[in-house]
Image (spheres, grey):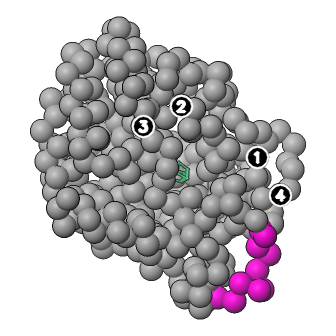
Amino acid sequence: MNSQTAAWQQALAAAFTSVDSLCDYLNIAPDNLPLLADYQAFPLKVPRGFADCMEQGNPDDPLLRQVLPLQDELIDYPGYSHDPVGDLAAVAEAGIIHKYHGRVLLISTGTCAVNCRYCFRRNFPYAQLQLSTQKIQRALTYIAEHMEISEVILSGGDPLLLNDAKLGRLLQELSKIKHLRRIRIHSRVPIVLPMRITEQLLTTLSGLATQVVMVLHANHANELSSAVAKACSDLRRHGVTVLNQSVLLKGVNDAGDILCALSEKLFACGVLPYYLHLLDHASGVGHFEVSETDAKQLLITMQQRLPGYLVPKLVKEQAGAAYKIPIC
Ligand code: SF4
């Protein structure tokens, strides 16, 4: 194992896993917070570098709010469910979710570098779907036999948590499939664990015959540290197209100023804002919801203040729909 690989794996192993230790690090008294008593079903996981982007002493910090398990998660909102976007109904083969024309999602791993409390997959049965060594060949065969598939989206969990050897093998196998034009990687790792963008990973990505698109997931400008900016720049220098998707979250980024600052900072990092998602209605996340009416108003604010290329598409995902539904 080289030193860069050892460094990101050690940083991941040292991530905060308890509210007390995270609050202690941030000089926040946990006793004053409406915390969820038992969060082991969806544990807390926060890399130290991400915690370093949070404001000391601020229990309302927008980054902290994304990761802190609160009692609000117990509220049973009508219309919220364990599989709000219909992923299970679209499972075509072990590890493959085939919803949209020409694109398939490959569930490459079940784990993430950070556990986001608003995640639509927080109740998802990853273990049943993620690719095991035995299942990879079946998934590759499915893609090879479906000539209409032009893009494979590596998702999870977070595909960048696969080690370089495993990820490299998977990418190489995919790039041998002649009708694939693009490999897309959906990842929050460059944001919360930017040291994962190692020389070895960059060499693998730049050596593929197929174009690579990486869609990051940042929700607030404070997430974009100088280390994140370097990771984005390294990806671009190695031929990767880098986009970002965000989720509109109450108490995190539901203000025009915050969303405009995010777009500006993303662009300064060489990243284009791609999607702004309405919250998916997964059980336990309803307290993050921003209404569609308010979301439209926020988008108008962005349109008034920013050049068009810095305004993401406001969309929602609807189970069974053939594409993400644009809002206004
Ligand atoms: S990184 Fe993505 S998949 Fe993982 S918990 Fe966060 S939102 Fe969910």
- Disc 1 crowd, CA 10 A, few/some/many (<14, 14-19, 20+): many
Mark toward the viewer: 1 or 3: 3
* Callout 4: CB less than 8 Å from ligand 1: no
- Name the element at disc 1: loop
Side (left or right) of 145 relative to 106: left
CA–CA distance between discs 1 and 2? 20 Å
Mark toward the viewer: 3 or 4: 3
Give the tally of numbered discs.
4
Horizontal and vertical percent for residue 52? 45, 80
Residue 62 among magenta residues: no
Rendered view: 132 above or below 114: above
Q: Which stretch did the figure color magenta? A: 28-37
Q: What residue lies at 39% left-to-right and 25% top-to-bottom?
A: 134
Rendered view: 137 above or below 258: above
Horizontal and vertical percent for residue 190? 35, 58
Q: Quadrant of residue 90?
A: top right
Label 4–label 2 contact, CB within 8 A:
no
- Name the element at disc 3: loop
Tell me which label, 3 or 4, sits earlier in the chain: 4
Which quadrant, please, contains the N terminus?
Answer: bottom left
Which quadrant, please, contains the C terminus?
Answer: top right
Q: What residue lies at 70% left-to-right and 36% top-to-bottom?
A: 84
CA–CA distance between discs 2 and 3? 9 Å
Residue 55 can be seen, yes or no: yes
- Name the element at disc 4: helix
Mark toward the viewer: 4 or 2: 2
Q: Which residue is mark 2?
A: 129
